[in-house]
DNA sequence: GTCTATAGTCCGATAGAC
DNA sequence: GTCTATCGGACTATAGAC
């Protein structure tokens, strides 16, 4: 669809959200205070509260950008894998979306930091994520995998994501790579033609 | 091993931990305050602080009982499935342990409420869980499953557990049953002789 | 052992200067 | 638009009565 990074967010707002995610990932959701976010972002509390008039607004912003990030990463991933045609096959879109959830890179800690902070503050903030999860599951199911296999792969991605966010992952770097590869190749099944 | 419910905890302490878990599961980790726990348990704040001298101690107690609960449920589950001999085969122990993590019953919400609260407060509190996770993974791997399959099943259990704790689970009751059944039968593989 | 009362700290939000 | 200063409230933890 649109190539816009994040629909309506200014670069300044991005810095604030980055700081918030960093805090949650590093020190836990309990340390996500307005003072700490402002200090981490290099602004004052008043400056922070201008963009997010309340802490609830900040949490909502974190959840919103989390979803947008996932979409953007999935799109670019599917595009890279299926360069040329306009519409990549469903299998490629799903694989890219799962891979986006598991990306180890810079924004990796951001993946669930927003969810964790929101859940700690007010579980109802996760409402936007619920529909999204169901949609992802449906997409996996629509492949020629049977429902149980699709659900297990979907859940495994969730489990790895959360485990790593909580620093609970029991895998070595090598083991993790093998597991991620296995999940993706199962999604791709007979058609393991991705360039990896 | 021992049939004792929880090693050294008095019944009064159990009530306090129950109240704390209920609060986290229902209203989020941010609402886990000493006042709220005391009120939920029907005692006064001083009474609570007699048993848990600090909030940190309360969180540690929650994590500790969470692990003990899992052990107890797994043992009884494996026992029921392999009545007779003293030592159930590894396959049964693993299946029982996974099933314990996914139990929908009374203590279900307790499964991860402690972890969520601990992670929100201080991520280092989850240290005792990390070794435990690796141990569970090793047990799954030691079956005649290959490593990737074992890891995926292990992660799927985690993912389902966390999804349900955060009220993010996209499954209907029927779908959930099918998925859990599929996970367990994969662990049991060729020997699907459990009485279900 | 359990409760009340209170001390001390930290956080979220507002008001107003620049 | 960003900052400083500050209010009011909620929280953890302690001291001491019963």
Image (cartoon, coloured by chain):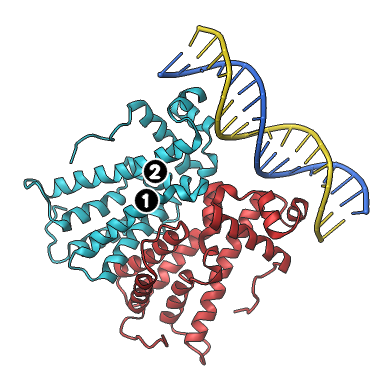
Chain colours: A red, B cyan, C blue, D yellow
Give x and y (percent) for residue A90: 43, 80
Give the residue at mark 2.
Answer: B63
Whether A152 is drawn above or below B51: the answer is below
Instruction: Work out whether mark 2 precedes mark 1 in sequence or the reverse, and give the earlier one.
Output: 2
As drawn, the label of residue B129 is: 1
Relative to residue B144, is residue B14 drawn left or right?
Answer: right
Quadrant containing the N terminus of chain A in the rendered view? bottom right
Q: Secondary structure at mark 2?
A: helix
Count of numbered labels shown in the rendering: 2
Whether B179 is drawn above or below B86: the answer is below
**Label 2 close to label 1 by CB (< 8 Å):** yes
Residue sitting at 37 percent across and 51 percent down? Answer: B129
Give x and y (percent) for residue B88: 12, 51
Q: Which residue extends farthest bottom?
A: A84
Give x and y (percent) for residue A153: 35, 68
Residue sitting at 47 percent across and 30 percent down? Answer: B53
Whether B135 is drawn above or below B6: the answer is below
On what subunit does the disc labeled 2 rest? B
Residues indicated by labels 2 and 1 sit on the same polypeptide chain: yes
């Amino acid at each position: 669809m649109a190539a816009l990074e994040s629909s309506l967010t200014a670069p300044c707002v991005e810095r604030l959200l980055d700081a918030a995610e960093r805090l949650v990932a590093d020190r836990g959701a309990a340390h996500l205070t307005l003072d700490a976010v402002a200090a981490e972002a290099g602004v004052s509390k008043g400056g922070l509260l201008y963009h997010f008039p309340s802490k609830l607004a900040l949490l909502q912003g974190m959840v919103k950008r989390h979803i947008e990030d996932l979409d953007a990463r999935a799109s670019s991933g599917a595009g890279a894998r299926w360069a040329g045609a306009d519409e990549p096959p469903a299998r490629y879109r799903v694989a890219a979306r799962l891979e986006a959830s598991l990306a180890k890179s810079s924004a990796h800690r951001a993946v669930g930091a927003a969810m964790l902070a929101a859940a700690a503050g007010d579980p109802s903030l996760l409402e936007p994520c619920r529909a999204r999860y169901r949609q992802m599951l449906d997409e996996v199911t629509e492949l020629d995998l049977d429902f149980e296999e699709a659900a297990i792969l979907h859940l495994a991605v969730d489990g790895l994501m959360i485990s790593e966010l909580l620093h609970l992952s029991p895998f070595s770097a090598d083991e993790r790579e093998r597991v991620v590869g296995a999940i993706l190749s199962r999604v791709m099944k007979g058609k393991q033609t991705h360039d990896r």
